[in-house]
Amino acid sequence: MVVVDKTPECARAVHFASRRTARTGASMLMLAVVDPPDDFEWLGVGEAMIEEASEEAAKLLEAAAREARSAAGVEPEQVIRVGKRAEEIIKLINEDEDVSFLVLAAGSSKEGPGPLVTNLAGKAASTFPVPIVIVPGGLTDEEIDALAG
């Protein structure tokens, strides 16, 4: 499973996951998590905000799926969840027994996978139900291909 978001480093994680999937003959699952609105539920716009964010997430997933097809001929399953990112990742892993590892991009900004990687690398990593692969955003396609086997 690879987590997809709008950070530039995400493409590196998708490339690694697709190459690794093709090499092992496995299937690939891509997850995008939509953050629920905090203060807009009472205005009745929370559902519209979630729908809009879900549409954006679907576009991100499709762009990532094109990368997977191009890089390795892999057709990934695409999943969108609404909630807190780390919680939704763990829920999906627990629900889908076929998920054997998690691929995350190592970003350096405050947004995107950077804080998630930091959080998981701390106390949460030791209790995670599958191995976590962290792909540095600065790797080239050739370097990723070599690492993915």
Image: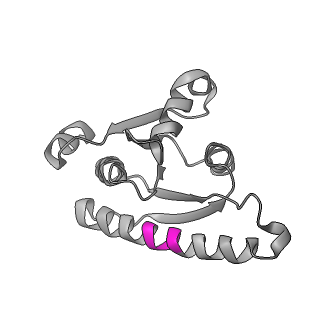
Depth check: 46 or 54 in front? Answer: 46
Q: What residue is at 69 percent from the left and 47 percent from the top?
A: 91
Q: Quadrant of residue 76?
A: bottom left
Q: Position of residue 56 (x, y in %)?
A: 51, 72
Depth check: 27 or 86 in front? Answer: 86
Q: Quadrant of residue 71?
A: bottom left
Residues shaded magenta: 56-60
Q: What residue is at 22 percent from the left and 41 percent from the top?
A: 139
- Report the label total: 0
Depth check: 127 or 6 in front? Answer: 6
Q: Residue 54, relative to residue 10: is it above or below?
A: below
Q: Position of residue 12 (x, y in %)?
A: 30, 49
**Rendered-image quadrant of the C terminus:** top left
Residue reaching furthest to the right: 42
- Magenta: predominant secondary structure element? helix
Q: Position of residue 68 (x, y in %)?
A: 32, 62
Q: What residue is at 47 percent from the left and 48 percent from the top?
A: 112
The colour scheme is one colour
Q: Is residue 123 left or right of residue 104?
A: right
Q: Position of residue 90 (x, y in %)?
A: 65, 43
Q: Is residue 52 left or right of residue 74?
A: right
Q: Is residue 141 left or right of residue 36?
A: left
Q: Residue 17, relative to residue 6: is it above or below?
A: above
Q: Residue 119, relative to residue 114: is it above or below?
A: above
93 part of magenta stretch: no
